[in-house]
């Protein structure tokens, strides 16, 4: 039985709307492994993770959670959870190793099998085309700061639409382009590890352009019932005080963290204050005629990834900053309250604030929570059980915030918990566990954590008790 088959349970006191999509999410490089099998070539994360000191403990995604070989086992876990939807990403270098030219059929076949097994299990596949694993050959040619990469991405989107368009109903072009642009090219803590404010702004623009071009390609190749989406990690920005200086610090971060994507995608323009703030870095002459119109190709929903709020004040930050145009004007401060193993504050109100802002700023745009979750120091006890009450409390609070936003008029259509499995957590390697399924990386054994049992119950009830 899936959550869609389950009858409503009147003991649920916070019920979600009928048809609400209950899902979980993963990313290719974080779980697949099989990094050199069946024609796959290195991505920027394969290269970056082999640079000494870039990833904790020298970890790589070479094996990860071995999902490439254990895909059927992982889909069985989803059936146990009762999820209605599964959000996965396609590894670009697995299907188009150089980022150019024809696809590798073995790579496409893996995703065909994945989608077919999901559908046979009554689970709706949600495909993300880019979750940070750029083919290394395209990075060698200049990467996302170069316009050509956006063109290559549109060609890749056409390949995937041709391979899976008849079976995948929802397509997300990009996942968190802010992280890819500013952590990858601004302060270098993510792949490819560059540290150039100009490169980060050029990359951000070319992500917007790539999204728009890919959205147009998908529209032209997919059935009319298909949905096209984009996922952003928008920042819930809070000024430390109502002083003019602190409010201006928040405005700067909102411009370079949020509106740098929202304005081109939904309004076909760049924020004027962003252009002013970044004048010492660039005059934005790399934005060609027609780019912003292309970036604003219509989409069917907006994906929101949320983990914690951002608190800022006027001043200068001591740490290396990815925030182009804000370095000398903004200090980042810790939010109060409990923290996760990532040292991120637990603050569900930030999610509510974000959803109600989007309700007001983007009327008529359906919203989906495409990532939300928490890392804690989980371990299997002597009985083999993994108890994670902190994660359950985190998830309960954030789902309650989503419910409150829906009650207050936000059009939220679904919730995808991050993540299904413990996995390769980027620069943290395997030291941080976000999964509701514990993975023993030595044996690849999967174990439901307490949070998995809890989430299965929420899905079956259609809400929170």
Image (tube, grey):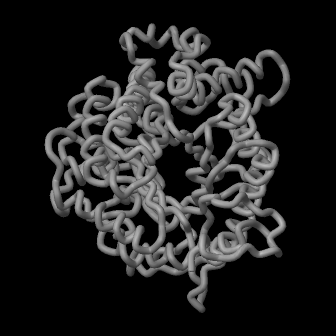
Does 446 appear above or below 67? Answer: below
Left or right? Give the position of 328 relative to 14.
Answer: left
Residue at image position (45%, 78%) is 76
Q: Position of residue 461 (x, y in %)?
A: 72, 73
| Residue 196 visible in the displayed image | no
Left or right? Give the position of 347 relative to 185.
Answer: right
| Residue 149 visible in the displayed image | yes
Residue at image position (40%, 78%) is 73
Does 70 appear above or below 394? Answer: below
Residue at image position (79%, 46%) is 336
Does 290 appear above or below 431? Answer: above
Residue found farthest to the bottom: 383
Q: Which quadrant holds the C terminus?
A: bottom right
How many marks on residues? Answer: 0
* Quarter-of-image position of residue 132: top left
Q: Position of residue 262 (x, y in %)?
A: 57, 28
> Quick one: 286 or 424, which is closer to the camera?
286
Does 350 appear above or below 244? Answer: below
> Quick one: 432 or 92, which is closer to the camera?
92
Q: Position of residue 325 (x, y in %)?
A: 56, 18
Q: Position of residue 445 (x, y in %)?
A: 43, 81
> Quick one: 170 or 346, which is closer to the camera?
170
Q: Which quadrant holds the N terminus?
A: bottom right
Residue at image position (34%, 75%) is 70
């Amino acid at each position: 039985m899936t959550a869609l088959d389950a009858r409503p349970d009147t003991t649920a006191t916070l019920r979600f709307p009928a048809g609400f999509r209950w899902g979980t999410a993963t990313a290719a490089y974080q779980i697949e492994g099989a990094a050199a099998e069946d024609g796959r070539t290195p991505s920027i994360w394969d290269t970056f993770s082999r640079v000494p000191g870039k990833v904790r403990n020298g970890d790589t995604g070479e094996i990860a959670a071995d999902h490439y070989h254990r895909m059927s086992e992982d889909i069985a876990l989803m059936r146990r959870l009762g999820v209605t939807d599964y959000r996965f990403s396609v590894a670009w270098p697995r299907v188009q190793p150089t980022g150019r030219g024809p696809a590798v059929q073995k790579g496409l076949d893996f995703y065909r099998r994945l989608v077919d097994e999901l559908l046979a299990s009554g689970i709706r596949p949600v495909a993300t085309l880019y979750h940070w694993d750029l083919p290394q050959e395209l990075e060698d040619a200049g990467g996302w700061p170069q316009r050509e990469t956006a063109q290559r991405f549109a060609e890749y989107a056409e390949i995937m639409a041709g391979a899976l368009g008849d079976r995948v109903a929802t397509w997300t072009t990009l996942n968190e382009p802010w992280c890819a642009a500013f952590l990858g090219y601004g302060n270098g803590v993510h792949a490819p590890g560059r540290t150039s404010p100009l490169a980060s702004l050029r990359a951000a623009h070319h992500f917007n352009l790539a999204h728009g071009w890919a959205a147009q390609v998908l529209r032209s190749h997919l059935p009319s019932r298909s949905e096209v989406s984009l996922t952003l990690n928008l920042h819930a920005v809070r000024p430390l005080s109502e002083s003019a200086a602190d409010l201006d610090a928040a405005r700067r971060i909102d411009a370079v963290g949020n509106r740098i994507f929202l304005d081109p995608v939904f309004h076909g323009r760049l924020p004027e204050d962003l252009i002013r703030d970044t004048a010492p870095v660039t005059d934005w002459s790399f934005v060609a005629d027609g780019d912003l119109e292309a970036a604003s190709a219509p989409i069917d929903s907006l994906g929101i990834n949320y983990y914690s709020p951002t608190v800022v004040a006027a001043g200068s930050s001591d740490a290396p900053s990815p925030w182009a145009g804000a370095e000398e004007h903004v200090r980042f401060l810790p939010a109060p309250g409990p923290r996760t193993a990532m040292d991120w504050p637990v603050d569900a109100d930030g999610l509510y604030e974000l959803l109600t802002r989007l309700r007001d700023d983007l009327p008529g745009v359906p919203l989906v929570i495409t990532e939300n979750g928490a890392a804690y120091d989980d371990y299997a006890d002597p009985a083999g059980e993994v108890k994670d009450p902190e994660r359950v409390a985190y998830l309960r609070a954030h789902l309650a915030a989503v419910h409150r936003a829906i009650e207050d008029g936000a059009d939220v259509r679904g919730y995808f918990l991050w993540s299904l499995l413990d996995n390769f957590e980027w620069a943290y390697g395997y030291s941080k566990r976000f999964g509701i399924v514990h993975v023993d990386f030595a044996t690849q054994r999967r174990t439901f954590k307490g949070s998995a049992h809890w989430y299965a119950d929420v899905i079956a009830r259609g809400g929170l008790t």
